[in-house]
Image (cartoon, helix red, strand yellow):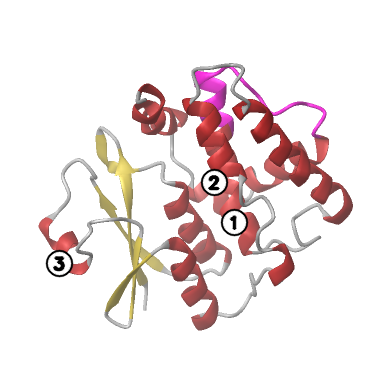
Amino acid sequence: MAIEICIKAARGAPDVLGDCPFSQRIRLTLEEKKIPYKTHLINLDNKPKWLFEVSPEGKVPLAKFDDNWVSDSDVIVGIIEDKYPHPSLVTPPELASVGSNIFSKFIAFLKSKDANDGTEQALLDELNALNEHLKSKGPYVNGETITAVDLSLGPKLYHLQVALGHYKNWTVPESLTHLHNYMKSLFSRESFEKTKPPKEEYVIAGWAPKVNSA
């Protein structure tokens, strides 16, 4: 029986897959495990009434297990791993937080209007740390085998690449060769191609309000 999931639709295109990295993480997990699923695209500008009945806050992503709707991508991928343990995507606990600060540092730099406020360097420090980890432990965070931490980082790094390229004309330094190889490997996986937003424009549009807000 297919798992039902609710994920964000593209802004301005409610019938098209949206740009939420947390929704993509869930779909990546399902694709890597070859688990059938049914997708409900949710227009965040006009949420359906039934969504609030199953999730009072009206937030996505959501996934349905045993007639219960569950929110939070961390919780959802944990349940998927418990219910469908093969192939295993378990990340060793000591590696689960690798790269965990990159997304928040990316957002801070993206929103920054002051080139000297340290947000760029803070992001570079995190990217350098990930590059060094991959240099010694790679090609994935846990060596040769892809795990849950990679499926969480992949969509976030894709957003970083697209949004910073568009809004800041900024790219990951070429010197971070292990990180570049890591991103190339993740982005070229069949699961990633199937689950990423169909156009970069949807990622760009998705970040526009955050860039223009104070």
Which amino acid is tagged 1?
Leu
- Bin the neighbour count of mark 3 within 10 Å (Cα to Cα): few under 14, some 14-19, many 20 and up: few
Q: Are marks 3 and 2 in contact (CB under 8 Å)?
A: no
Q: Residues within 10 Å of mark 1 (few under 14, many from 20)?
A: many
Residue situated furthest front in the rendering: 117
Q: Which corner quadrant holds the N terminus?
A: bottom left
Taking the image as shown, residue 188 lies to the left or right of residue 199, namely right
CB atoms at circles 2 and 1 under 8 Å apart? yes
Residue 151 is tagged as: 1
Was residue 181 drawn as part of the magenta stretch in this picture? no
Question: In which quadrant is the C terminus drawn?
Answer: top left
* Disc nearer the start of the sequence (3/2): 3
Would residue 195 appear left or right of 55 to someone viewing this image? right
Query: Residue at 24% of width from left, 45% of height from top?
Result: 44
Which circle marks residue 75 in the picture?
A: none
Q: Amino acid at mark 2?
A: Pro
Which residue lies most toward the left here?
49
Residue that mark 2 sits on: 155
**Separation (CA) of disc 3 from disc 1:** 30 Å
* Residue 119 point in image, percent of width and height: 60, 29
In this picture, which residue range is highlighted in magenta? 161-176
Q: Position of residue 107 (x, y in %)?
A: 50, 35
Q: Quadrant of residue 5?
A: bottom left
Q: Which residue is mark 3?
A: 53
* Callout 1: SS: helix
The residue at the point 25 percent across, 32 percent down is: 12
Q: Which of the two labelled residues, at mark 3 and mark 1, occupies the earlier sequence position?
A: 3
